[in-house]
Image: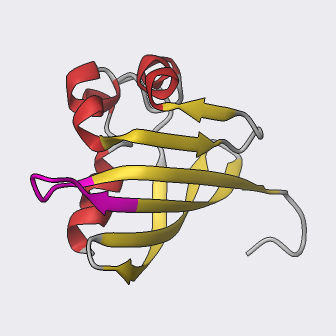
Amino acid sequence: MTEAIDRERSLHDPSVRLSGALAEALFDPEFIEVGASGRRWTRAEMIAALPTLHGGTENSTPITAERFEGTVLAPGVVHLTYETRIEDRHARRSSIWRRDAAGRFRLYYHQATPVPNGPDRP
């Protein structure tokens, strides 16, 4: 579980977001994301876009990730949930990591759900 959390956090690191090779090593070949905007991303689209998204440069607004929780769904498959803040945007996130043939966790699925501003927001 700790390895999956560490790898999830590394995806928020500008050095990883700027390096196609480092990013490729983290994404499963069958990766799919449903972003906070509702857009569906493929592995190739996400790797290409990472340098342009928040957290993609040393000078961009950092991504704050907190409240990580994880559950083992099956041997070699971990489901993580956590929350992020980027400037004034807050999202709840869900990721599924699975081990590849070499034993490394790779991100298989990710979904972000925006949390609206308001009195009910934690």
Q: Residue at x 50, y 52 (%)?
A: 109
Is 2 situated left or right of 112 in this image? left
Number of labelled discs? 0
Q: Residue pushed farthest right? A: 119
- Nearest the eye: 96 or 37: 96
Q: Is residue 19 visible?
A: no
* For residue 38, above or below residue 43: below
Where residue 28 appears, x then y in whole percent? Answer: 34, 43
Is residue 98 covered in magenta?
Answer: yes
Q: Residue at x 56, y 56 (%)?
A: 84
Which image quadrant for residue 7? bottom left
Where residue 112 appears, x then y in whole percent? Answer: 65, 52
Q: Residue pushed farthest left? A: 102
* For residue 21, above or below residue 29: above
Q: Residue at x 45, y 32 (%)?
A: 55
Is 57 situated left or right of 120 in this image? left
Q: Quadrant of the C terminus?
A: bottom right
Task: Give the colour scheme shown.
Answer: secondary structure
Is residue 25 covered in magenta?
Answer: no
Q: The magenta stretch spans which residues?
A: 97-105
- Nearest the eye: 20 or 64: 20
Q: Is residue 48 visible?
A: yes
Which image quadrant for residue 37? top right
